[in-house]
Every structure is written in structure tokens, then in C-alpha cells.
Amino acid sequence: MNMKKIRFIMTMVILLWAGSTVSTYAQETAIRVINIPALKELVPLDPFKITQQQGQSFNPTLGVNVYFEDGTTLTGEQFIQKVQDPNYIPVPYVKKEDPNIVVAMLVRKASADEKEALEIMRKQAGAMEVQNLGDQADQHNPEFMKPIEFDPNTKYEEFTKGLRKIVKKPGDLQKMGSSFLNPTRVAFFDPEGKFVSWQPKDDAEAAKNNGLSKELNEYLYNTKEWVRGETFVDENNTIKAIKFRKSTMEERKNAGTVTGSAVNMDDAGSAMSSSAKLDLSFGDESLEKKLVGSKAPAINATDINGKEFNLANTKGKVVVLNFWFIECVPCKIEMPALNKLVDTYKGQDVEFIGIANNNKEALMKFLKTTEFKYRIIPNGLSIANTWNVGGFPTNIVIDKKGKVTFLEGGYVEDIEANLKAKIEEALKK
């Protein structure tokens, strides 16, 4: 497969936080007081006791409200680098009146007990492609990011021989610790031990499946159906293979989320970024069934031009929402089609709002070279969380009465026609 064919590569930096209980390896550690003005009125949480709700409420890799212990702010890339270093630990901060929503993050040096606990949990999770990074040089080595073209006849027993196996048994808690997984360098196997290739058949399949094959994308992201039952690592704790199994009923109820971003092959080996939590919903509890036909959740935000947008003030208009982020390749692919819609309905009672996870500065730079005619709202991850949107892109149509009439998650080739049909329908009512 040539460079063009593999230009969509999924790079995942996964923050593994315990769902609701403390890992048996976590130590009772006094929470330190850090003298940073922005954190003065906030309350620090014990980093070893983060609930699932708290863990999903804030994405530190966006580089917004993320601080280092000396008071400086950290970009998303800097945050990733720091938390992969076993000498540092991320500490979430919340408001006193709302302890379930993390609003800021501090990265500080870990105590001896904390480092020991983190090291054990990282090994138990079997989750690090790189560990004990030192000067971070390995992370920027192109060879480290280079995809492996596995033999499609790779055998489970032969490939995993000599590797250390970490088994996730039903009921095992997810362990805390930072994790980096490059799926293009891991041999995956289905529950029967059959090899599953990461390589998509073509660009269209890649665009729809986070840069991966449809089969592997299903195993990795349908966390309500599949679990990484066996993880195989080498002597450096580098993941070499993963075997999936069907999730249990209890695991389906507690299915977690992952954070990730698609990056262009040309950027492989450069600074990594993770920009959006992918909160996947399936079956009867899907996001579409929850939202379509119901009143749209509130949105009250400021766009990149400093103008206020309040969804409650759009009654009498049709509103079209697009949830996206800069690093999302499928999001960028559909922009020309969305721009056509903006032109088609210019002067009519239709508002097009793009809710982006990136900050204003990054968006302004991006829009200088890429045209997107929607009205853009920055720092939109909190809005996405409120709407329970985790897949990107996600397109939504809201009618004149404020009711959601359409929702399409993921990349869809005929998104322009789908949205146009629903907009026309909403305009007639």
C-alpha cells in the first residue's frame, strides 16, 4: 500500500482513569497545594480516584486550561509528553459547586509512591508503546510511527510466542495510567485467533473508519461489543499483539471511551495530538434514538468573532450543527459539501453552526488555508459532551420549534443530500 493509500493513520493517546473505584495499587497521597492563580478557586481531585463522569468531562489534550506546576500553560502536545513521562502526574481540578465536571488540569511531579503506583498500573494495563521516555526523543522518531504491513496469514500462536500475555478477565477494572497505541504497528486477532488487518481497502474505507479497515475499526471502537481480552507485550512493555473477545453484559454497561485523532501520513513521526473523545453509542441506546424527536439541548457560547450564540434565540429558524475538530480527516473531507449547503440557503431562515473542539487561535490559523463557511464556535468539547456527541463529524438538524429532526454520525458520502432533504422538510413546517 503506497503513501497515499495509508495517509489516514489513527494515533491514540488514551487516558485510562478508573471508572468508580480505586485501583488496588493506588497509594493514599496527600493532595498538594499549588499556587497558580487560575486554580485558586478550584478544588483538586485525587488523581487516583477519578470517576468515569469526571474523566469524560474534560479533554486536556486540547491544551485549554492545562497548567504545569511552575504556572505556565501547556499545549496539547506538551501535555501528552509530560503525562507519558513517569516522573509527572496529571491532577484534575473542579469547581466546588460542580465536583463532577473537570474544568482544568495541572501536571506536576509525582511523589515516589505515586510513581510506583503509576508504573505498576501502566504495566498491568499493558498499555504503553513507549515507556520511561526520558528526553521524549523516541516519540518524534519517524521509524517509531512507521506502519507495519503484516502478512495476512499471520498466525496467532506463532506471533505471540515468547511475548508476555496480559489477560483482561470479566469484572477486571480498567487501570489508571497513560497509554499510547499505534494500531498500525500491532497485530490484531479476532476471538477465534484469526488475523485482522489494520489496512483499509481504499481511501473511502479509511475515511469512514478512522484510517483503519472497517473490521478493525469495529473491534477497536465498538466498546459495548468487544474487549481487548488479551494484550501481548515484549520485554520493553511495548504492545505487539491484541486479541479481542466478546464483552460481558456488565462490561457493556460500563463501556468506556477513548480519545484519539486521525493524522495524515505525512505527519507521522511529528508531534501527536489527541483532540476528541469518541463516546460511541450503539443499539437501542444510540445517540440518534436519544436525540431525534426531542428538544435540542441548550447551547450558549461565543463564536470565533466574539459574537454570542444562543440556541434558544433561534426559534423560527432551522439550525444545522456540525461537530468537528481540525485534526479529524473525515471532518475536513466533508467541508466542501457543507459549504455548498451554506451557499444554497443563503438569505433563508437557516443557520449553520460549526462546533469545534479546538481553541480560537488554532481555528483562526486553520481557516486561513481551509474554507469552512459555517459560523464557528471554539472550545466546543463541553457542548459535545452535553449533547453526548463523541463521534466526529456529527451533523444535526434542528427545526424551527427547537426539536432535533436529524442526526448523522461519522463520514457519509451523501451528507449534502441528506442534510438538504431534512432542511427542506423543516423549512416547510
Image (tube, grey):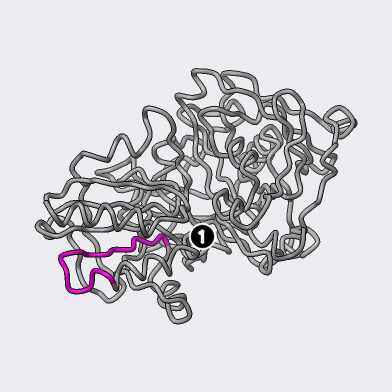
State the count of labels.
1
Residue 269 picture quarter: bottom right
Q: Which residues are magenta?
A: 344-357
* Location of mark 1 (residue): 328
Above or below, 154 relative to 375 = above
Residue closest to the eye, 365 or 95: 365
Image position, residue 38 (x, y; %): 36, 62
Quarter of the rendering containing residue 188: top right
Say which amino acid is labelled 1.
Cys
Q: Which residue occupies 19% across, 68% down?
A: 308
Q: Nearer the viewer, residue 208 or 73?
A: 208
Residue 61 painted magenta: no
The one of 180 and 402 positioned closer to us in this rendering: 402
Q: Nearer the viewer, residue 296 or 24?
A: 296
**Most distant residue in the bottom direction:** 368
Residue 320 at x, y = what percent? 27, 58
Is 206 placed left or right of 379 in the picture? Answer: right
Which secondary structure, mark 1? loop
Q: Give the residue at x 28% y 63%.
A: 353
Residue 338: x, y in percent? Answer: 37, 65
